[in-house]
Image (cartoon, grey):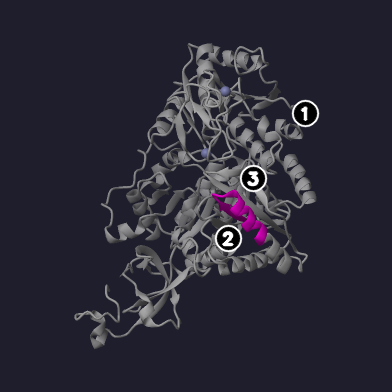
Amino acid sequence: LRCHPFSKAKKCCYTTPRRAAIYRYRVAVPLRLPTEPDGLLDYLSPTPLEIGTPVSVSVRHHQTLGIVWSESSTSLPIESLKTITSVWPDIKLSDIERHFIEQISRYYHQPLGRIAHLAFPPDALRYFEKPPRARRNHLPTPMPTPPDITLTADQQRIIDCIFPKQHTTESFSFKAHLIHGITGSGKTEIYRHLAHHILEQGKQVLWLVPEIKLTPQLIQHLAPAWADRLVALHSHLTPAQRFKAWQQAVRGEADLIIGTRLAIFTPLPRLGLIIIDEEHDASFSQQDNVRYHARDVAVWRAKLHNCPIVLGSATPSLESYVNATQRGLYTYHSLQQRAIAGATLPTLQLIPPPSKESAYPWSDILDQAIQKRLDRNEQTLLFLNRRGYAPVLHCVTCGWSSECRQCSARMVWHKEDRRIRCHHCGIQQQTPKTCPGCGHPDIFPMGLGTQRLEEALKLRFPEARFLRVDQDSMSKKKSWEEALEAISTGNVDILIGTQMLAKGHHFPRLTLVGILGTDDALYSADYRAPEHLFAQIIQVAGRAGRAKDAGEVLIETDYPEHPLFRSLLQHDYTSAAQEWMTERQNAKLPPFSFWALVWAESRRPEVVREWIHHLYKNTHAIFLDTTQEVTITPPMPALMEKRAGWHRYYCLLQSEHRSSLHAALRHIEHHLYAKKNDRAVRWRIDIDPQSL
Ligand SMILES: [Zn+2]
Ligand SMILES: [Zn+2]
């Protein structure tokens, strides 16, 4: 199909009478700033095509994956249209899938073509043309089948409630469930049983997990029974592996699809259940490129496919908790006992941080507790959510500090390779030998990162065996599996880690958790910070005492009277949630009002400021003033005003009615699309923003 219908070439296929028919289609292509909001372009085809078929088309002289979206009734002259280059008829997006994509595109105010693209793996075009060699998707070697765990009465009750023994077709229709179960209460066992029910029905299960590092353990756990019917979908696969796994899922050859947020868009012909583990986790929200929240997207998807969805967490997001307990949108299930008989929740205790005179960057109480664990041959975990050696280098003489020139942030010192790095934009440089401000040779690392903590611990406890788990030490693919192995075989005495270590892992010998450096989050400008801190501490604390040994958790803080700690020390999520609800209801914060941001960014601060003030003035005057249902705030700089060289500003739109908010956004969008594209400014709309 390589030639144009009106090509002058002598041997053109269109010039022969029997090929003269021409079909016009609207094709979804991923334009960043589309000329039309829907991101559909018109193309020609010499043969009729089925709607939903992936094709290759030329966009701005590049071959791009497109999806045939609808027939076109364009009045544009044929000469101005391009022809579809190639067609891959084996795979097709069903009507439901397309409907789903349209809904998501409308909700997030994102061009349809960009959302449609999420249903395909990157490099899909390349592999459609040249399928990857049939190498099996990498799965860890299955471990011996775990003993069939007897379910507790609580677990059984929830399973029976979701899929009653006498099931009817209704049991398999759309219904959203929230399982609120304390750490170690055996939520995974429930998911496993639910998945089993659905697989028995010949349907597919989509199981989302927050962190890719969790999948090897989960897959190992599930593989013995389902090894040949299971695929994993996440960004750590090679492009060929990911395409292969995707293809198996799309063709219905795989029944159980385990993945991170990106898997939520995978077309599945027989979808029967969606599971979202740790539904509160921030990693389900995609912050760059196309913005969406995989948990919310999943609920729509389940609704459209008319299948149940199960969300689970020890500390549900306030949104889900309100949906379950106040709005009656989700069925609420609670699990308040640990699954292993005799295992209790660890005791939480607040301790003062080390004083200025302390020899080590942790308190004496923590020091004695660690020593006690070493004597008893038990494990300790020290949690510090700050990687690197020290968060900043500082000169006492002139006050210089290692600011990033591209971001409103400081560069972190990494002692191992003697470099300073910005954790936001990624730039790095050699550590300066003398102060760049005044030339004085004494510049000091200030504050505590995981590397520095490890160094100090090694000096204090020279006989202990250490393992540090953070993004820097776990950058190699194998290292995480090796680390888990070392932890579970008891080859580690003291673990030091960031949040990477906090989730889902089962460490039987761990009886002490020390939590350092949480105070910044207590008085953060982000209204969600207390919720996130609560979740994080409960998660980390949950690693301790999962077996029969009771666990102890020591939290260093200067603010023991902070209200957050009252409910935290009691492991009382419910009363904490009540407090947040009252607070947010009074202040009209989400989930009691709906938010959207219009972002603008530019490399030149004065340009972006003028652009957004102009937008504010216009929208405020013409539209928003007349309806009382939507309010728009004057432009504000982002909490981190400059990032990777871009100055970022936003206007916040608020409403208690979702429909009014979206109507206002459509109006703004219209205004923005009509505007001459100013290359110096990038803009985007952010629905249900997770950060400011
Ligand atoms: Zn200086
Ligand atoms: Zn930076």
Q: Is residue 18 above or below residue 674?
A: below
Residue under pointer 1 = 561
The three-letter amino acid code for the residue at tag 2 is Tyr
Residue 534, horizontal then vertical, whole percent? 66, 37
Query: Could you say whether the residue bearing mark 1 is in a helix, strand or loop?
Result: loop
Q: Which quadrant of the structure image shows residue 41?
A: bottom left
What distance separates the C-alpha of mark 2 from that of mark 3?
23 Å
What residue lies at 60% left-to-right and 49% top-to-bottom? Answer: 605
Residue under pointer 3 = 316
Q: Which residues are magenta?
A: 598-615
Q: Check disc 3: other Cα within 10 Å, few if <14, some if 14-19, many if 20+.
A: many
Does the magenta run of residues contain 614? yes
Which of discs 3 and 1 lies nearer the camera? The answer is 1
Query: Could you say whether the residue bearing mark 2 is in a helix, strand or loop?
Result: helix
Residue 291 lies left or right of residue 45; in this view the side is: right
Query: Which of the numbered marks, if any, corresponds to residue 108?
Result: 2
